[in-house]
Image (cartoon, rainbow, N blue to C red):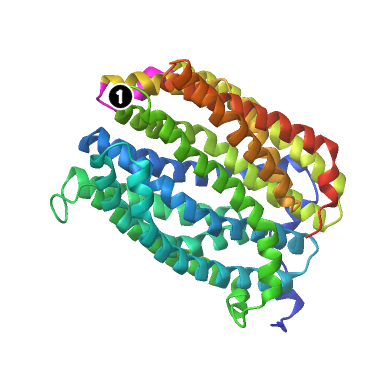
Amino acid sequence: MTNTRPHAENKLEAEDVLVSGSLWKAIWTMTWPLILTTSSSSLVGLVDVQISRQLGSAAQAAVGVSEQILFMFMVFIMATGVGTTALVSRAAGAKDPDEVDRTTGQSLILSISMGLVLTVLCLTLSNLVIFNAGNSREVALAAKQYLHIYAFVLIPFSINVIVNSAFRAIGRATSPLIIILVSTALTIAGDYLTVVRNWPVAGLGLRGIAFSGVIASSVATIVALLLVLRSPLRNSLKCLLPFTRSYAARILKIGIPSAFNRLSWSLSVFVLFAILRHCDHATEALASWTIGMRVEALIFMPLLALGLAVSSIVGQNLGARQVERAIKAGWQVAFIGIAMMIVLGIALFCGADLLARCMSRDLTTIGYTVAYLKINAFSEPFLALAMVLSGALTGAGDTRTPMWFAIFTNWLVRLPLAWLLAVSWHFGPAGVWISMATSITMNGLLTMIWYRSRRWIKTAI
């Protein structure tokens, strides 16, 4: 669909900041809203686990298992967002607003279709996965109850991902912040009201947490669409139809490797669950994994923000044919991430006991959680390398290389080492935590070496 708009209306308001002037200013402009955005997202997961502790360790484990299953379906929608960011940022850097609109509109219709199909698949297949992943019937039944409601979040999620990706790609990082803050506030309020206050219906338990998430995400979608209508992306809603296969192919070419990257990690987690089942106190071990991941997510979400920010900066600068500026942006943001994670890693190590006691009342769970946090604290700077530089590669359209690194470090390093340490050598859950830290370190080093080679610059999108 071709738009016939005056040139004045075609201007992308925020793009010049990313491709000209101070690179530090560009990084700051994109990063601070995204740090707040991603931190808010991780706060929701942390509150879900903290609130569910009132329902016991089995409920906490059920939240972890359920959301890991849902994540396997979400990765395909997020892959569409990755493709959207790469293509829209290139078009924005090249000052081609019509291409920005067409790509955004086609991404939206593709993602919405995926959201509907994946919701049905999640509801259909989740029982099989739950009863194989759960370490007890109690956990499995609670997970089933939770997921059969929360699966419907995939529909509003499919819209929010694309809108947020497109906003970031044109340099408007504050719009995703507004959308996420609305979702976060409503989710936390809903968790508290339904579980702690037993309102509006008593005894909802985990179902209350699930309902809160779905309602909050749906309201956030309404806010997202209103923001689109008041932004330079407003004409993208005119480009939803007809659906064009060529755009879908370009989006998926970039996005599918990203999906396999995330799916590789997600599936490897279920193998870790199976390994944890061979440890003593399996329910507590799984609960500690759930808590540890949520606590750790709160500190590595700023890294996700940096990765998202540098993806847009690199994409726009490559679109504007400023290759050296794009490369330099990746290194500068990586330096910020490493410095940040050294500080936060120290804080995580020193505060491990306090954090664990805030999240659980079970002494065994607390002990396992403390070990998780202290061991993984050492790998945080390498996590910064992996996440930030992978974000830069994504902006260039190179999503295949990070995918192969993820498959190698998760399946050929993490899982065999976890079995060896936890089961064969009887280290218990601590062996799993050591394998996680080792694989993260290797992933960071491999990503750094590839980025330094500059071969990713030639990626065709």
Label 1 element class: loop
Q: Is residue 45 left or right of residue 94?
A: left
What percent of the width, then of the height, locates residue 110? 57, 70
Q: In this view, does 97 lie to the left or right of 346?
A: right
Asked whether residue 216 is drawn in magenta, I would say no
Q: In this view, does 138 lie to the left or right of 91?
A: left
Label tally: 1
Residue at position x 35%, y 47% in the image: 130
Q: In this view, does 348 lie to the left or right of 125?
A: right
What percent of the width, then of the height, locates residue 438? 59, 24
Image: 246 above or below 267: below
Residue placed farthest to the front in the image?
A: 424
Return the residue nearer the eye: 1 or 126: 126
Residue at position x 72%, y 35% in the image: 447
Name the residue type under label 1.
His
Image: 107 above or below 454: below
Inspect this view and state whether residue 344 appears: no
What percent of the width, then of the height, locates residue 263? 55, 48
Q: Dividing the image into 4 quarters, which one contains the C terminus?
A: bottom right
The residue at which mark 1 appears reads as: 281
Which residues lie in the magenta part? 351-362
Inspect this view and state whether residue 319 appears: yes
Image: 112 above or below 382: below
Label 1 neighbour load within 10 Å: few <14, some 14-19, many 20+: some
User: Magenta segment, principal secondary structure?
Assistant: helix
Examine the image and state in which quarter residue 390 appears.
top right
Examine the image and state in which quarter residue 245 appears.
bottom right
Image: 426 above or below 18: above
Residue at position x 54%, y 31% in the image: 415
What percent of the width, then of the height, locates residue 372? 44, 23
Q: Dividing the image into 4 quarters, which one contains the N terminus?
A: bottom right
